[in-house]
Amino acid sequence: MEPTAAVIIAAIVAGLVVTMMVLAIPWYAISTYHRRKLEEIRAKQKLDIGEETRAAIEGLRKEVAALRDTSTQYDVSFDTALNRLDSRMSHLEQRVRTVENEVNSAHVRP
């Protein structure tokens, strides 16, 4: 191969490489712009889902608070009812003891 042919081939290859590099820059810019836009859309969708999730969590928090209040009210009501029953039972037991003592004392006197 003659030196002139080698220089011409090297110049053609160098020209092709430079041309490919020049054409690759806009392609790379378009590709990265497209990827960035897709990532922005995905991030926005995640935020939208996040807002829906936040709203659902807030609704659940309100429901749990309402259930907690209701259960507390039932607990207090149940405790009050037990105290009333205990008081009634104590009163009845006291009356039964009084009646038994009167009956026993009446039998002992004859």
Image (spheres, rainbow, N blue to C red):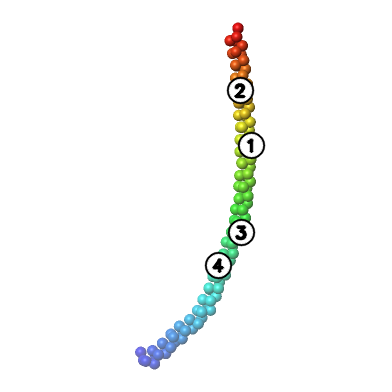
> Tag 3 or tag 1, which sits nearer the N-term?
3
Q: Are marks 1 and 4 in contact (CB under 8 Å)?
A: no
Name the residue at 40% across, 90% down. Answer: 7
Nearest-to-viewer mark from 2 and 4: 2
Q: Residues within 10 Å of mark 2 (few under 14, many from 20)?
A: few
Distance in Å between CA atoms under marks 1 and 4: 56 Å
Q: Which image quadrant: the N terminus?
A: bottom left
Distance in Å between CA atoms under marks 2 and 4: 80 Å
What residue does disc 1 label?
Answer: 77
Residue 38 locus on image (x, y percent): 56, 68
Q: Is residue 110 above or below residue 41?
A: above
Q: Are marks 2 and 4 in contact (CB under 8 Å)?
A: no
Distance in Å between CA atoms under marks 3 and 2: 64 Å
Q: Are marks 1 and 3 in contact (CB under 8 Å)?
A: no
> Tag 4 or tag 1, which sits nearer the N-term?
4
Name the residue at 60% across, 29% down. Answer: 86
Residue type at mark 3 is Glu
Residue type at mark 4 is Glu
Nearest-to-viewer mark from 3 and 2: 2
Distance in Å between CA atoms under marks 1 and 2: 26 Å
Q: Are marks 1 and 2 in contact (CB under 8 Å)?
A: no
Q: Nearer the viewer, residue 89 or 1?
A: 89
Q: Nearer the viewer, residue 97 or 52?
A: 97
Distance in Å between CA atoms under marks 3 and 4: 18 Å
What residue does disc 2 label?
Answer: 94
Tag 2's secondary structure? helix
What residue does disc 3 label?
Answer: 51
Q: Is residue 22 above or below residue 98?
A: below
Residue type at mark 2 is Gln
What residue does disc 4 label?
Answer: 39
> Tag 4 or tag 3, which sits nearer the N-term?
4
